[in-house]
């Protein structure tokens, strides 16, 4: 059993069946196939939007391409210090933007607040040649700490960003988990809150590999198709992506998968926190759990072959704990996590 991440699970049977079916007929290439066209229409229906939509196979490509579209090589892009674009994409955003400066902002629980953004943006003087020029705010929903921006927090950040002339990018690798946790509509948690471009991840929520880039203002997507092609991210058999997205959205499959993952996380964190010495770093609001595990628990899990991710303690109260006292662990539940797995894990841990 390995709960280190939600990309360790495979794909939902419904999505794999849709892929198998998509392999059977003749279709136009490069995203002009019937499935991709239908998937774009379905996304716009679900989001009550008229977005320009593009599909790619990785979240890193989605983020980097979207950010490149809304910035210039001499831009500043603001994000939380722990953001995936800042910490876990090997410089892809810097590369595809042609060198934009990623500016990490500290903030409790993996979240930026308006004061933090204001202070960071204030470091760069507009129109002054020596400074990079602020262009974009990038937020992660779910955040890198497994927490959520409430709709009001998101709207306030977007409003301030727009006042400053920044466009807002949302890294939605776990957008579905946030959506079902907050009980918002997709529109409320994206364009109605002020998000300009959403990278909507299906991969961690039951797809094999599929991410949608949604520009809610079609003008922002001008010539984007060449940016994607030039980077080598237009799939020849684009149906591979369209088929997954269509099956993912069909009959709220994406929401069911995310609801299940979140429920498993709630169950797991409740049981873990009952164990003496286990301490939670941040509130568990979606499908990610960050806890300090005492050495005895760590040993029991290891002996039983139960794996999680050991995580950097930065930004937590555990920074100065000696390693022999335990480990800072991340558990991520997915659509494929079963109640039996949680039961076993908790029994062993206890
Ligand atoms: C997983 C993840 C991504 C996408 O990563 P890829 O591995 O490139 O698909 C982006 N943002 C966050 C917050 C993630 O957790």
Image (cartoon, grey):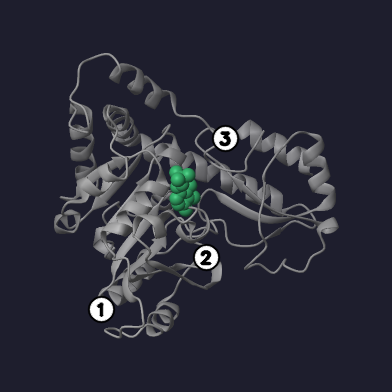
Residue 26, position in %: x, y? 20, 16
Answer with mark 1 or mark 3, whichever residue precedes in sequence: 1
Q: How far apart are the alpha carbons under marks 1 and 2?
A: 23 Å
Residue at position x 85%, y 49% in the image: 296
Depth check: give the residue in front, 241 or 330.
241
Q: Which residue is identified by label 1? A: 163
In this image, 48 relative to 315: left or right? left
Q: Which residue is identified by label 2? A: 110
Whether tag 1 and tag 3 are in contact, CB under 8 A, the answer is no
Task: Name the quadrant of the N terminus.
Answer: top right
Residue 176, position in %: x, y? 39, 46
In this image, 135 relative to 257: left or right? left
Residue farthest toward the top in the current orientation of the protein? 24
Residue 188 seen in render: no
Task: Name the quadrant of the C terminus.
Answer: top right
Residue at position x 79%, y 58% in the image: 277
- Compared to 324, does 251 lie above or below? above
- Compared to 180, does 22 lie above or below? above
Q: How far apart are the alpha carbons under marks 1 and 3?
A: 43 Å
Mark 2 closeness class: few <14, some 14–19, many ≥20 residues within 10 Å: many
At mark 3, the secondary structure is loop
Q: How far apart are the alpha carbons under marks 3 and 2?
A: 25 Å
Residue at position x 21%, y 46% in the image: 226
Question: In which image quadrant can residue 19 be found?
Answer: top left
Q: Which residue is identified by label 3? A: 337
Mark 3 closeness class: few <14, some 14–19, many ≥20 residues within 10 Å: many
Residue at position x 25%, y 59% in the image: 191
Residue 275, position in %: x, y? 77, 52
- Compared to 349, does 13 lie above or below? above
All told, the count of numbered labels is 3
Depth check: give the residue in front, 200 or 337.
200
């Amino acid at each position: 059993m390995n709960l280190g991440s939600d990309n360790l699970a495979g794909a939902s049977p419904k999505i794999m069946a849709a892929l198998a079916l998509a392999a059977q007929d003749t279709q136009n290439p490069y995203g002009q196939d019937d499935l991709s066209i239908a998937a774009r229409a379905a996304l716009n229906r679900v989001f009550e939007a008229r977005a320009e939509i593009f599909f790619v196979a990785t979240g890193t490509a989605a983020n980097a391409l979207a950010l490149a579209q809304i910035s210039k090589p001499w831009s500043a892009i603001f994000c939380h210090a722990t953001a995936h674009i800042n910490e876990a994409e090997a410089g892809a955003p810097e590369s595809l933007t042609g060198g934009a400066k990623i500016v990490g902002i500290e903030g409790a629980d993996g979240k930026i607040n308006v004061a933090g953004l204001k202070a960071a943006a204030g470091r760069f003087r507009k129109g002054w040649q020596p400074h990079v020029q602020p262009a974009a705010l990038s937020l992660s929903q779910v955040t890198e700490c497994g927490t959520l921006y409430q709709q009001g927090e998101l709207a306030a950040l977007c409003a301030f960003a727009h006042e400053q002339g920044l466009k807002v990018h949302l890294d939605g690798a776990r957008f579905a988990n946030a959506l079902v946790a907050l009980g918002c509509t997709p529109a409320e948690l994206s364009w109605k809150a002020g998000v300009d471009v959403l990278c909507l991840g299906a991969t961690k929520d039951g797809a094999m590999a599929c991410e949608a880039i949604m520009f809610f203002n079609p003008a922002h997507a001008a010539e984007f198709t060449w940016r994607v092609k030039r980077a080598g991210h237009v799939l020849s058999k684009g149906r591979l992506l369209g088929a997954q997205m269509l099956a993912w959205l069909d009959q709220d499959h994406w929401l069911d998968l995310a609801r299940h993952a979140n429920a498993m996380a709630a169950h797991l964190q409740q049981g873990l926190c009952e164990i003496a010495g286990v301490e939670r770093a941040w509130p568990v609001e979606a499908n990610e759990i960050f806890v300090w595990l005492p050495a005895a628990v760590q040993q029991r899990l290891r002996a039983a072959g139960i794996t999680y991710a050991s995580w950097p303690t930065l930004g937590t109260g555990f920074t100065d704990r000696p390693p022999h006292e335990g480990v800072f662990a991340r558990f991520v539940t997915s659509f494929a996590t079963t109640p039996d797995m949680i039961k076993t894990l908790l029994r062993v841990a206890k």
